[in-house]
Amino acid sequence: MSKAKAGERLPYLLAKLKTPRVLERLEQTAERARAESWPYEQFLETLLEAEVFARDASGARMRIRHASFPALKTLEDFDWSAQPSAERPLVSHLAQLSWIEERANVCFFGPPGTGKSHLAIALSLKACERGFRVAFATAQEWVSRLEQAQDRNQLETELRRLERYHLLVVDEVGYLPLERSAANLLFALVSRRYERGSIIVTSNRGFEQWGEILGDAMVAAALIDRLVHHATMITLKGKSYRLRERGLDVTPAAQAPSLRDSA
Ligand code: ADP
Ligand code: MG
């Protein structure tokens, strides 16, 4: 009777466990372990680490794809000297993401082209890398998504589904005024997420103008109240980076709220 060779069944077992990187590196790592007389623990650790790193990376890639960012912008390619009002230490602190664990929010204000969406995306990318689920859309897009759900009598289901995300980005609040019904949907979204999940909002209008944007001062006040209860506010100032790069400057002064970090 022939005795089974040691490790003969490993390819089968590793395939069954769905650990392709362990299988890939097995022979080479075993050789090295023998040559360098590794402890057994080091051998196992080396193999499992390769699998876990690869899984983390592909998970992050999937979350980034799923988030539907309009462009990939990072903190590393943000030019801080062009935007001193971005408060680098504060943004770096936000990049640690403890606010997402606390289900708190971040609001970026400032005129067009000052980097609001850039920073919102950059923080969101960090969140994806860290394992948080993120969804990005403009305020208009969120509203139409919720309108469609409402038309199918599925608003509640949709709001519940959105709870799966750790972070929603609501970009460009205030570029277009909203209908009363749309404002109510935006309010439903924000109030559903209150203390359940994080939101990043970007807006070219200060809160004092949100009554006008939302077409209803009461709805605006109730929405802002929930949004800012646990929130960090960052106001970007200055010229549009887009125009600045082209040597143009037609940006109006920032219409920024005086509110800051009410958390
Ligand atoms: P906003 O959302 O405030 O209108 P964006 O974040 O979309 O502006 O910025 C406009 C463009 O300029 C984007 O391509 C963005 O990457 C770039 N940009 C803005 N500010 C900076 C900055 N300080 N450093 C690098 N790129 C910037
Ligand atoms: Mg923007």
Image (tube, helix red, strand yellow):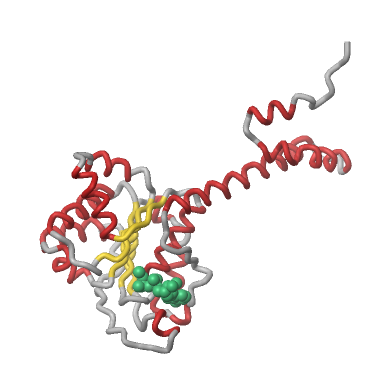
Q: Residue 50 placed where, x, y %?
A: 68, 44
Q: Can residue 87 be seen here?
A: no
Work out which residue is located at the far top of the displayed protein and give it. Answer: 1
Left or right: 106, with 213 as reference point: right
Q: Position of residue 98 (x, y in %)?
A: 43, 55
Residue sitting nearer the eye, 218 or 145: 145
Query: Seen in the image, is 192 located left or right of residue 240?
Result: left
Image quarter of residue 109:
bottom left
Tell me the quarter of the picture where residue 121 sits: bottom left
* Quadrant occupied by the N terminus: top right
Determine the residue positioned at 14% across, 66% down. 211
Up/down of 175 relative to 168, above or below: below
Q: Nearer the viewer, residue 191 or 203?
A: 203
**Residue name at image x 37 percent, y 47 percent:** 165
Q: Is residue 196 above or below residue 23?
A: below
Q: Quadrant of residue 47?
A: top right
- The location of residue 223, given as percent across then percent down, is 20, 57
Please say if 74 is above or below 45: below
Q: Quadrant of ligand 2?
A: bottom left
Looking at the rendered image, the quarter that the C terminus falls into is bottom left
154 to 214, vertically: above or below? above
As rendered, which of 129 and 96 lies closer to the eye?
Answer: 129
